Image (cartoon, grey):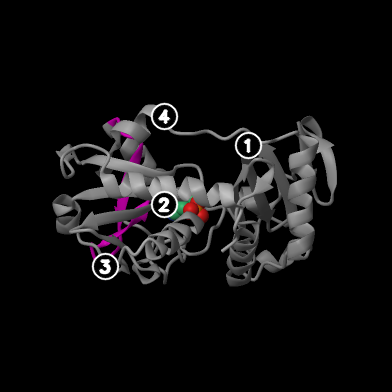
Amino acid sequence: MKIWLNGKLVDKQDAKLSVFDHGILYGDGVFEGIRVYDRKIFQAQAHIDRLFDSARELRLPIPQTKQELIDAMYETVRANEITDGYIRLVVTRGEGNLGLNPFKCSQPGVFIIADQVALYPEEMYRKGMAVIVAKTVRTSASMVNPSVKSLNYLNNIVAKIEAVDAGVAEAIMLNAKGNVAECTGDNLFLVKDGQVFTSPIEAGILGGITRRVVIELAKRMGIVAQEEDITTKDLYAADECFLTGTAAEVISVTKIDGQVVGDGKAGPMTQKLLEAFREFIRSGEEL
Ligand code: PMP
């Protein structure tokens, strides 16, 4: 496997970072997870824009231009002969000392991994998945803003441990107000009376690229898609619930905290949007 590291493709065993890199010492850095479909990078521009937005919030200067990083991702995909797969693009703060001050670090480090994608089992797409509502509260925008896709995922990991302990694949995280924010690695949607709802960015979520595409596709299909606060009551009363994310795409949720959602099957609206999403992938359109 070839890894793109600070401008060069190197063998996996030579792709090394300093133990003084603040990405490792403090989770100080940003990243993107991106799909490759039929050798094409899905929504490359949107992912690169989000990476730069995340980095700007952390005052982390990325040494490459956006286009250079897109070219580097394609170079890595080709070098690893990936047709359908997953890219991890990471920017770390760089090597520093043991103090927190990020501005004492040298150049930020950038690396790109292009690999196979780890997917939920196909059965889950047909039958839907079970999730729980986590006790762990999503960090608020005034803490570490969830719209920054940073290397510090501990808030999500602690909630993911709750999911694993409960024997389910995902956990819904609430915000400090008690409303639904998002899942540990996916955004959440509800369907009620033929309309689609998802939490607004202000609820303290990552602005998912898949979420954005699904909202746009719903609108194109004449389905009302609202970004509105979602309560736990709304969750249990929903006709359908589904998650969106780069790896998951669009996946139905049929059980929340052991309670059946709707009629307990992957719902028709979810299926329709998943089909539309897959068609959108084939179209190669960039939003
Ligand atoms: N929320 C969180 C916390 C995530 O980590 C992800 C996956 N990156 C998402 C939502 C979904 O975002 P996207 O559709 O861009 O993968």
Using a 10 Å C-alpha cutoff, classify the residue at mark 2 as few (fewer than 14 neighbours), some (14 to 19) or many (20 or more): some
The amino acid at mark 3 is Asp
C-alpha separation, residue under disc 2 versus residue under disc 3: 21 Å
x 62%, y 42%: residue = 37
Point out the tag, 4 or 2, that comes first from the N-terminus.
Answer: 4
Point out the tag, 2 or 3, that comes first from the N-terminus.
Answer: 2
Q: Is residue 98 magenta?
A: no
> What is the number of the mark on residue 167?
none
Which percent across, then down, holds residue 48? 65, 61
Q: Kindly identify which residue carries mark 2.
A: 155
x 80%, y 37%: residue = 79
Residue sitting nearer the eye, 17 or 2: 2
Q: Nearer the viewer, mark 2 or mark 3?
A: 3
Is 263 located above or below residue 136 in the figure? above
Q: Kindly identify which residue carries mark 1.
A: 84
Position of residue 65 in the picture relative to residue 285 (left or right)? right
Q: Kindly identify which residue carries mark 4.
A: 122
Residue 51 falls in image quadrant:
bottom right
Instruction: Using the rendered image of the protein, determine whether residue 95 is visible from the camera's viewpoint.
Output: no
Which percent across, then down, holds residue 244? 41, 50
